[in-house]
Amino acid sequence: SELFEPLGIIRTEELLQARRLDGGEQFFTRVMDYGFSKKREEAARIWGEKETLGDMVRAIRLYRPLVIISRFTGTPADGHGQHQLAGYLTPIAFKAAADPKQFPEQLAEGLTVWQAKKLYVSQSFVQNTNNVPTLTINTGEYDSLIGRSYFEIAMEGRTQHKSQEMGLLELRGKQNSGLRLLESTTAKSEKETSVFDGVDISLAGIPKLVGLSGDFLNGELKDAQNAAAKALENYDVLNPAKTIAPLTEGLKAIREARGKIAEKSKQPLSASLADADFLLAQKEAEFSKALQTAAGVVVDALSDSETIVAGEKIGVSVRVFAPESTVAKVVNISLKTPQGWNSLAAPPPDVPTIGFRPRNENAFYASFFDVSAPPNAKLTEPYWLDKPRQNFNFDWSGEAAKNLPFQSPLVTSEVKIEVAGQELTITKPVQYRYADDIRGEIRRDLNVVPKVAVGLESDLLVAPVSIKAQKRRLVITVTNNSPNAVSGTARFNTPAGWTLSPNSAEFSLAKKDEKTTLAFDVTIPPNVKSGDYKLTANALVDGQTYDQQMQEIAYPHIQTHRIFSRADVTAQVLDLKIAPVRVGYIMGSGDKVPEAIQRMSLTVTMLEGKDLSTGDLSKFDTIVVGVRASQTRPDFVANNSRLLDFVKNGGTLIVQYQQQEYVNQKLPPFPAKMDMVINGTQRISNVRVVDENAPVKILQPTNPVFNFPNKITSTDFANWVQERNLYNFSEFDAKYTPLLESHDEGEPENGGGMVYAEIGRGKYVYSSYSWFRQLPRGVPGAYRIFANMLSLPKSKVK
């Protein structure tokens, strides 16, 4: 269930976790990952080259980098088509960001053109005599301040991409990273020592950097630069307060420089002045943060709940911590809330009990608030889900957070302090904090959730076209998200002529997070035409109808997010028949195929290690192997010979897509390979068809897979999603019969996506077609073909 948008949230968060390690800021385009892609042209067609370029230009104009480094080259060496497109567009974006004729709507929104000084491309993928690095950086160099190398940090960051299984060793010692200079607006040197060669990155160099002439701001910026040098000279790890005086002088000088720019705001600022103010604003933030740290000031803003319901309130505490000797003074504490919310001062809450004895957090200063959400408070979910997406592009029109990973925190504290005559504003998002018995302190962002959430056991119902009435079971879970008791009535809205039993169900939930599960039987009337029908679950509470599902995306390594969707069940009525077979299922890395089999009115038995090693497999007609079981189920590998004996004795074994381990361990009944060489040198380990609309040819029309109990035609391959297949057999023994052929445009034919073999009295099928994607999405043809595979033991077709 965590595919598409939910997977996007997970991978966005994993990028942010990596950035928390290396200190970088992460920007995004509006495009959505649509699955594996082989070619840049496909990515450009699906995403829209202009739209993607515009988002990249926007990110450059937002951040205004001096140097850009492209991770990808824009060639097939990058691998995925999406990577190729990113590499191809980066040099174009480098120039377009400085061109006022490119994407002028961004300038109308307040952005300005920006010319980065240099553009490099990483040499990680392609290193040869024609692409000699301009600069080689030893990223394995030890940094005594942080106690490790930047390469180690990078590898720890890569390990945060846990959903992609990217854990790596944090290698020590020399590690060279090559960069090739593609574009430069500065004088080029024959041999570079830094990406900033030719670029004055000093404070005093800002005027020249942005094109200001004369000595405007020179005095203030030299003072700030000297103050920064003095702070570094004064730094004492045992007494960081020694840096307060020079940091104060530096901050004062930066503010004076910005004040001079502001004096000119009575007339339109030149682009150079606007750029100077942008860079100085960053320096002001850096001086302010350094001064706050030197003064030892820490701010914590906590709510007493992770969630809030519209129309209700929560408590918020804002505490300021500082050493007893601090020179900082608290000037004011306030909360920034969404429009329509209220925050009022409140008395301190009761002292919490931590562990076996009460503990106080001894704050230097504290304020407490009651925060109330209005009755129409908007549910909290990523801003790019506010509007329906267009194909694989999110609609972020009208959003202030464009290019950002998520919107700003719901509630933020603002603490104004004074240090040595300079006022600082410290912002801190309000979070909920709790103690996990194993992991210790956990923090979660504050979210608005519905008073009642309606969860579906399944959002898909499958039924054959029938002259008789049919009954199906619908199960919902109602969850109370309010701190108060709730009671109400749950029901389904059904199509005309469909009946529900019971018609509705009462529920009562006494406390927050309490749930109840309710079952309904829906009767589909006779002679319903094939097609999709909608049934919507809802709960009526205090005169208000709630029909939102709440999907919580929570893992230990990322921030928790919630997304909402209407509690719709799609009832798919289709021309579907299936034989009464007994099915066993060996789950692999995880898929929803067993639920799909159950929707076809079959009982599925999940097979565990003991079943495979000593169980009676003869009680099954068909056994299905889940995706990637050869990687994740050592008991499947160990007992593969028993499964092949099951086939010899008359059973049917259906193996869904596996990776190289399957053939490397010689698990198929006859020899097969999965890799192949193309263009004479390039070896591909995953022969696949990524175009979900690629033509499919039925090679053996008389085979039972295409005849019993459903007659399969080319129309059954319509409306597939994401891809046709993956990890096909590239070569296979003559004892296999290829059943289907499909290939991406411009590639050779391949019949290894579904092969069939009769072994003894039984049947074996390796099918790398993406049933694990098609069946949960309710693709009619996928159900009909899979039903035929399951029914093979009962087929009389020869």
Image (tube, rainbow, N blue to C red):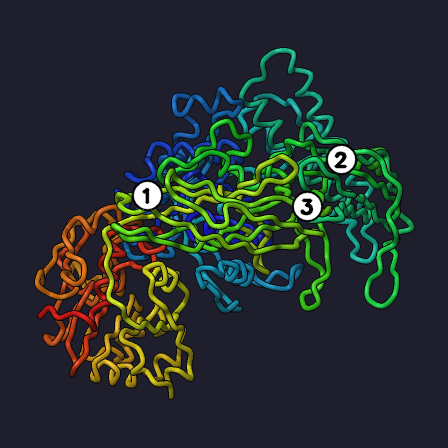
Task: Name the residue that disc number 3 marks.
Answer: 486
Residue 44: which disc? none
Badge 1 local density, few (<14 within 10 Å), some, or many (20+)?
some
Check disc 2 and report its element: helix, strand or loop. Answer: strand
Image point (66%, 55%), residue name: 514
Which of these two is toward me, 595 or 348?
595
Q: Residues within 10 Å of mark 3 (few under 14, many from 20)?
A: many
Looking at the image, tell me whether mark 3 or mark 2 is earlier in sequence order. Answer: 2
Does the image show residue 577? yes
Q: Amino acid at mark 2?
A: Leu
Tell me the residue at 75%/39% (across/down): 313
The mark total stands at 3
Residue at the top extreme? 267
Residue type indicated by callout 3: Val
Q: Which mark is residue 335?
A: 2
Q: Earlier in the sequence, mark 3 or mark 1?
A: 3
Residue 25 placed where, x, y %?
Answer: 56, 44
Q: Is residue 182 above or below residue 768?
A: above
